Amino acid sequence: MAIILYDLAGADPALRFSPFCWRTRLALAHKGLSVETRPWRFVDKAAIAFSGSEKVPVIVDGGRVVADSWAIAEYLEEAYPDRPSLFGGDVGRAHARFINAWADAALHPAILRLVVRDVWSVLDPGDQDYFRASREARLGATLERIVQDREARLGAVRQALEPLRLVLAASPWLGGEAPSYADHSVFGSLQWPRCVSRPDLLAGDDPVAAWRGRMLGLFDGLAERAAVA
Amino acid sequence: MAIILYDLAGADPALRFSPFCWRTRLALAHKGLSVETRPWRFVDKAAIAFSGSEKVPVIVDGGRVVADSWAIAEYLEEAYPDRPSLFGGDVGRAHARFINAWADAALHPAILRLVVRDVWSVLDPGDQDYFRASREARLGATLERIVQDREARLGAVRQALEPLRLVLAASPWLGGEAPSYADHSVFGSLQWPRCVSRPDLLAGDDPVAAWRGRMLGLFDGLAERAAVA
């Protein structure tokens, strides 16, 4: 039986851009598990109330419900120990938690300030008011004002990716010789602008762009085939 | 036979503050290896010319010479596989490389701008000219000018530590239930200002300060017993 994934969607239900849901999509594919996604909107709190969470990703695996991309990754590793490992052991998992936290705390907020207006523009009208109000309150300015200095902020985002470049100079994946959940975690943050925003965040000759290209090709091009706005 | 470590020293040869050498000190202690340190100064290029490196840490382990803190950690893990692991496997090592790169690319430059004048002040007079010229060229201002807005920059450094806090909310060490090389790597960056600079970089109630306290206590208080300026 396929695992059900509640997956953030735009006005076009095929448009799936959430960085956190992308982490889970790739983790499921990494484990070779089949998935049935359910498009979800920000205002659909009722649809996932059974999970105790107000946000996606939420998965339902038979009788088991798990919310939050990190908790889902830990659940999958534990529930499917015979499938390819996401973490490569306890220390690998602990270290991946840091990389995941770095994406959350350093990368995500910087990219949000570039793409927040583009995200708004692809949302269902029912979601747009919710998204504008909550993000403008959190960021302390209108969406239009936040993205006004996009060009100036772009350099800071590219600079924030520097640890990634240092790693990619030594190995093809954050997981070393093969992708790990650390790759999926950071990739989610780059798939997000790729799905909703133009022009590209990355310079063409950036090693991070080459790595993203490898990530896009994984699992028969799962991320590459994703709808873009 | 003890491993020899060339270790950056101040005017007081007992003062050892290099973040990179601290990584190696802790890695050696983690492996339970005895070490004989040789105080080294920036201008002593000739003393380590045999290593092919112009910087410390450099170790000599019998006939084997290894320079660069990351290369040393990989060497120790490979040469002493029966001692406590620094990485917990290949994926753990790959992930640790990211955390190490984050310390190098995000944390280190931010802390440098706070402590660069304090570092200068503890150096041997022979090193002070070299250090001032090289750092002023790299940072594009006088040491005194760089640290002028220390207070303003302090918030940015504390903010940069946020991924660490997210991890420490879930586990006591970056390595999970026990310290790993990731802990030693990041700790090195905090031991550096602790040895040369007042006041403390961290607020007393910061979970990062509690973790640093645990790090200071490891290996019979190896880092806690370090000389401070």
Image (cartoon, coloured by chain):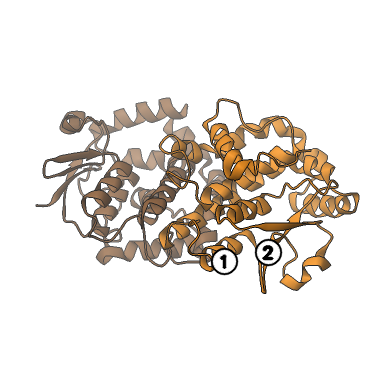
Chain colours: A orange, B brown
Across and down, in percent, residue B175 comes to: 41, 60
Label of residue A133 in the image: none
Secondary structure of residue under mark 2: strand
How crowded pointer 1 is (Cα within 10 Å; few <14, some 14-19, many 20+) is rated as some
Q: Nearer the viewer, residue B173 or A119?
A: A119
For residue B179, which quarter of the picture?
A: bottom left
Q: Residue at x 30, y 50 (%)?
A: B22
Q: Nearer the viewer, residue B91 or B130?
A: B91
Q: Is residue A43 left or right of residue A104?
A: right
Mark 1 vs 2, N-terminal side = 2
Q: Nearer the viewer, residue A7 or A53?
A: A7
For residue A191, which quarter of the picture?
A: top right
Query: Mark 1 touching mark 2, by CB under 8 A?
Result: yes
Compared to residue A90, the image places residue A29 above or below, namely above
Residue under label 1:
A75
State which chain disc 1 sits on.
Answer: A
Q: Is residue B213 left or right of residue B15?
A: right
Residue under label 2:
A59
Q: Amino acid at mark 1?
A: Tyr
Q: Residue at x 58, y 37 (%)?
A: A212
Compared to residue B1, the image places residue A110 above or below, namely above
